[in-house]
Each structure stands twice: as structure tokens, then as C-alpha cells.
């Protein structure tokens, strides 16, 4: 401490800080196909149907029971009438937004155990702080990535994932065979698409940008009838298979 008469005092304080480890990401040594224990239920809240569809597809594929709501009011009605283990809600919606929804949930003691996860494309720290102040447990950025979603659910629902692992021996040869097989089953194999379009789709798939990828496939299907079957089947596939199929198509050009 330093003090000067008539001017004041200056204090220095040292506080011990222990950094908390980041939650472990789901295993990348294989593909998540489910989780152990009883079925869990998730409510997905968003006024944009395409955003709900993306999250729902990720969840349903690994065994979650999923309900949807297109507004905060609709979500609150469902939460009060049914059991949910978790809620994933957009924070920017017309009417009752996600933050208002979360505050109402947190004010009800009967709903206190629900894991509340905010989702938004906003990059502003203020929006994240507002979501935290409203009572959300975590924040899921848009465009939603499968690995981010599973990491958050693993932490807050205390999940133990079931992972399908592939043999390490001859993995390159096996991966190539699976790539060719998955691509050959698709109508047309993308042969009518220009190379630059295939590369654009592959970039979106590699980024995990599901919404933009689906929009682009829908656009291609509408503009080029030769690509309709190819595009429609890609929309229904998991991202790794989509990437493999596009890589195979490029390799055949």
C-alpha cells in the first residue's frame, strides 16, 4: 500500500486464480450414433423452420425425442405441459424472444432443472451476456455445428456417447471404398454440375454450414432438372457422407 497525505492511497491485491478446463469435446475417433441410458427429450425453439430442421436432424439421428416451437409463447405452453430435458432456443424472435422465455422458465421452480441453451448468429458479446443474465446455461452459435451441439449437450445433460469406431488398419483404403460406394449410389453422381459448383458445395460441407448447403442444393435442384435427384439425396445425408460424395464426384471429372 502506498499513501500520500492529502492525495489518497493506492492498494495492490493478488488473488489466486485457477483456470477451469474446457469441457471435453465428443470423441472424434469415430462417429456418434447414440447415447447411453434413457431417451432424452429436447425442445427446439426458433421462428425460422430451416434452423429448427438442422438442429432436429442432428438430434434425431442420435436418438433424442424432439419437439418444435416457432415462438416463445408456443414454447412456454409446451414446456409447462410436457417434460423436456433441455431447450435450445433462438434468442431473437418476434413477440416473446428467447431471453424472455428463459426468464419465465427460470422463475418457475418446477422447471428449474431444464437445461436452457441459447442459440444465435450474433457475434456481439452483449447478446451473450444478456442470454447468460436471462438464465441460459450455455450458448450455441449459428450456423449450428454438430460437434458444438454435442459438446454442449454432453456437458449439461451429462451424456455418455455411444461411438461407432472403425478399425484403424487399412483405414485409407476402407475410407476410399466407402466414399466411392456412397457416391455411386447417388443419381447422376453430380456429373452435370460444373466443377466450380461442386467445389462450392464441398466448401460448405467442410465448414459444416448445413443451412447454406441445403439452400444451395435446393437452388441447384430448381435451376437444373438434371441435378434434382442428386441434390435431393444429398440433403438427406449426414455431412461426412455428403463430403465424401462430392470429393468422389470431383475426382471423376
Image (tube, rainbow, N blue to C red):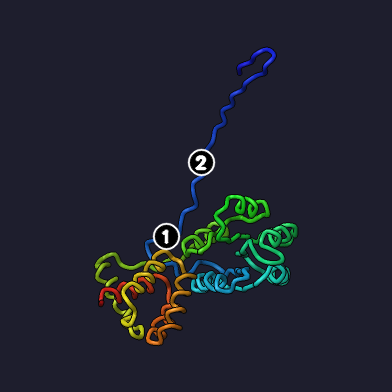
The outermost residue toward the bottom is 225
Secondary structure type for disc 2:
loop
Earlier in the chain: of badge 2 and badge 1, it is 2
The outermost residue toward the front is 223
- Which residue, given by chain and number where applicable, does mark 2 sit on? 19
Query: Compared with residue 26, is residue 180 higher up or lower down, i.e. above or below?
Result: below
On screen, residue 217 versus residue 172, left or right, reads right
Judging depth in this view, the residue of 184 and 232 nearest the camera is: 232
Q: Residue drawn 44% across and 67% down?
A: 32
Judging depth in this view, the residue of 37 and 139 nearest the camera is: 139
Quadrant into which the N terminus falls: top right
On screen, residue 141 versus residue 202, left or right, reads right
Label 2 Cα neighbours within 10 Å, binned few <14 / some 14-19 / many ≥20: few
Q: Residue drawn 55% across and 73% down?
A: 50
Q: Is residue 43 visible?
A: no
Secondary structure type for disc 1:
loop
Check residue 27 in the rendering and tell me which mark sits there, or answer none. 1
Q: Are marks 2 and 1 in contact (CB under 8 Å)?
A: no
Amino acid at each position: 500500500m502506498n499513501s500520500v497525505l492529502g492525495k489518497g492511497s493506492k492498494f495492490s491485491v493478488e488473488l489466486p486464480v485457477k483456470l477451469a478446463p474446457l469441457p471435453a469435446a465428443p470423441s472424434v475417433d469415430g462417429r456418434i450414433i447414440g447415447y447411453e441410458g434413457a431417451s432424452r427429450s429436447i425442445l427446439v425453439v426458433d421462428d425460422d423452420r430451416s434452423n429448427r430442421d438442422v438442429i432436429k436432424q442432428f438430434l434425431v439421428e442420435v436418438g433424442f425425442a424432439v419437439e418444435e416451437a416457432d415462438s416463445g409463447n408456443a414454447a412456454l405452453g409446451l414446456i409447462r405441459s410436457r417434460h423436456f430435458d433441455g431447450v435450445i432456443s433462438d434468442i431473437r424472435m418476434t413477440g416473446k424472444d428467447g431471453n424472455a422465455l428463459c426468464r419465465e422458465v427460470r422463475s418457475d421452480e418446477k422447471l428449474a432443472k431444464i437445461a436452457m441453451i441459447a442459440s444465435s448468429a450474433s457475434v456481439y458479446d452483449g447478446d451473450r451476456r444478456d442470454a447468460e443474465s436471462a438464465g441460459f446455461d450455455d450458448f450455441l452459435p449459428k450456423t449450428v455445428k454438430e460437434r458444438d451441439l454435442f459438446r454442449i449437450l454432453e456437458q449439461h445433460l451429462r451424456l455418455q456417447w455411444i461411438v461407432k469406431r472403425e478399425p484403424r488398419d487399412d483405414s485409407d483404403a476402407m475410407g476410399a471404398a466407402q466414399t466411392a460406394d456412397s457416391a455411386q449410389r447417388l443419381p447422376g453422381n453430380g456429373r452435370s454440375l460444373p466443377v466450380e459448383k461442386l467445389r462450392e458445395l464441398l466448401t460448405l460441407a467442410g465448414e459444416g454450414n448445413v443451412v447454406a448447403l441445403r439452400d444451395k442444393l435446393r437452388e441447384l435442384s430448381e435451376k437444373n432438372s438434371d441435378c434434382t435427384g442428386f441434390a435431393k439425396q444429398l440433403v438427406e445425408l449426414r455431412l461426412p457422407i455428403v463430403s465424401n460424395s462430392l470429393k468422389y464426384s470431383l475426382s471423376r471429372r
